[in-house]
Amino acid sequence: MNQPEMKNQKTDEEIARLVQTGNVDIFGELVGRYEAKLKRYGKKFLAGDEAAVEDAVQEAFLKAYQNILSFDAQRRFSPWLYRIAHNEFINLLKKKKSEPMRFFDTDIIFPHPVAKERTEQRAEERLMTELIDKCMDKLSVKYREPLVLYYFEQQSYEEIADILHIPVSTVGVRLKRGREAVQHLCNKLGFEL
Amino acid sequence: MNIENTKITLSDKVIGEIKDGQVKMKPRFYFVFKTVFFVITLVFVFLAIVFLVSFILFVIHGNGTWFLFGFGWPGIKMFLTSFPWILAIIVLVFLVFMEILVHRFGFAYRRPLIISLAGVLCMGMAAGIFVAATPLHEGAFQSAQESTLPVAGALYRNYGVMPTENLYSGVVSEPIDENDFSIDTSEEQNVKIQMSTSTSFGQDVIKQKVEKNDPVMIMGEKKGSEIRAFGVQKFEKNKEPLFQRWQNNAQMRTQKNKQQDTKNKQQDTKNTQQDRKNTRDDQGNKSR
């Protein structure tokens, strides 16, 4: 079995464990697996400025390497890496100052009923994804990010909660409000679901 | 093709920076140290909350503020004005700080803020109530009064004896009649208590047959050595820790008075001897 085949069989967590033991080269495999995903996440979340997104993604990988020993290989690697990327993108937004950033949101205070992810929901998702893609840049950061993570990055409610450090019920609320805002915006712009 | 090139380039860039030594993996002890420091801070903040909650309970119990609820609405109003709000605000600040600290953990941030904050508050309150039930603060208070408690001595001396306005406690010194009786407080003896038909719970107290040495708490206006009572409460003798405090204070006061008397007597004797000596010296001088 050659080296690339062996790498492909390993899970992200197994590769991360190898990096922790000092195998630097195999970290390139993780970069390869997540580069396109993180760039897509960054471009959709930040709505443009590709060069800045690429720099932020590179910085996120370097920070992931620096802090790899803090990663618990018993847990999933993907939310851990997305969390680092999220922090990088937030720093970028703060520097830009064009997007209003709220450090505290009232929707994280009280419990909200969480609508479970339904099977038929997935059927609507393709259409919703198209709509979100068209109206994304008009949405506020607060709703844009969970929508990107859920519809484009296929992260679950729990994983989004881990990435954004917000309650699981708040993820549900923001997705619901985000969808409503997208429909409203798209109707205004003449697109329909 | 273009995408493939970009992918390889980024991976090469990242690996290149790592191999050049521009980026280094943080050592494990860095994360261990960070975690230990974090846990120590968390424990310190929690202990501070527990100490302050138990101290507030000790203070409001010790100066009688706690019992104001028993005097109805006027008592509640007085409770609100007598409560040590500064300490309560400090507790609140520590609670917010602790919430910020625990919010790093999944069990905290995955739940709504109100729930994790309530959890922190409940733990702090429960531990505070438990500590308040131990003799820790009473012992520290006694040490502070004897000036043998370092650091927190001033805190105990300031708050531990802080009187509540219009609230007096003591033991009955003269048997009750229809409208009044006398009490000994830790500061004075034979303070006359005047009750009227408008005195809250006054009739209940009369019905309970208050006897000599019964501990009581009076809410009322003091003029000279008389208190016009708005409300009266009787406690079960020896079951109330506050009663123990009054007894201790009374004993300490008696001891201090005795010591002062002895000192005064010794001083008087010295003065008398000095006077006699001076008189003898004067007489000697005159006779010469």
Image (cartoon, coloured by chain):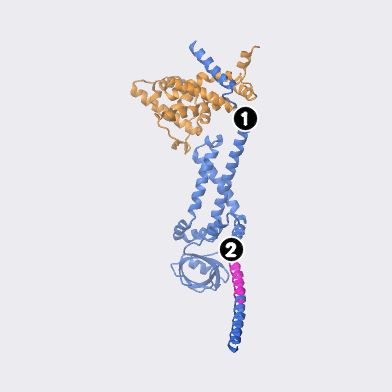
Chain colours: A orange, B blue
Q: Position of residue B283 (x, y in %)?
A: 59, 87
**Residue lying farthest to the front in this orientation:** B288
**Callout 2 crowding tier (Cα within 10 Å): few <14, some 14–19, many ≥20:** some
Chain letter of mark 2 equals B
Q: Where is residue A107 in the image (x, y as percent from the top left)?
A: 45, 36
Q: Is mark 1 on a helix, strand or loop?
A: loop
How far apart are labels 1 and 2 at the CA level?
56 Å
Amino acid at dot 2: Arg
Q: Disc 1 marks which residue?
A: B27
Q: Which residue sits at x=51%, y=59%?
A: B65
Examine the rendering and report whether any part of residue A130 can be seen: yes
The span picked out in magenta is B244-265
Amino acid at dot 1: Pro
As drawn, A23 above or below B51: above
Magenta stretch: residue B246 in it? yes
Q: Give the numbered dot on residue B89.
A: none
Chain letter of mark 1 equals B
Label 1 and label 2 in one chain = yes
Please tell me which residue lies in front, A192 or B85.
B85
Q: Position of residue B58 (x, y in %)?
A: 56, 56
Examine the rendering and report whether any part of residue A176 can be seen: no
Disc count in the image? 2
Q: Disc 2 marks which residue?
A: B245
Q: Is mark 2 on a helix, strand or loop?
A: helix
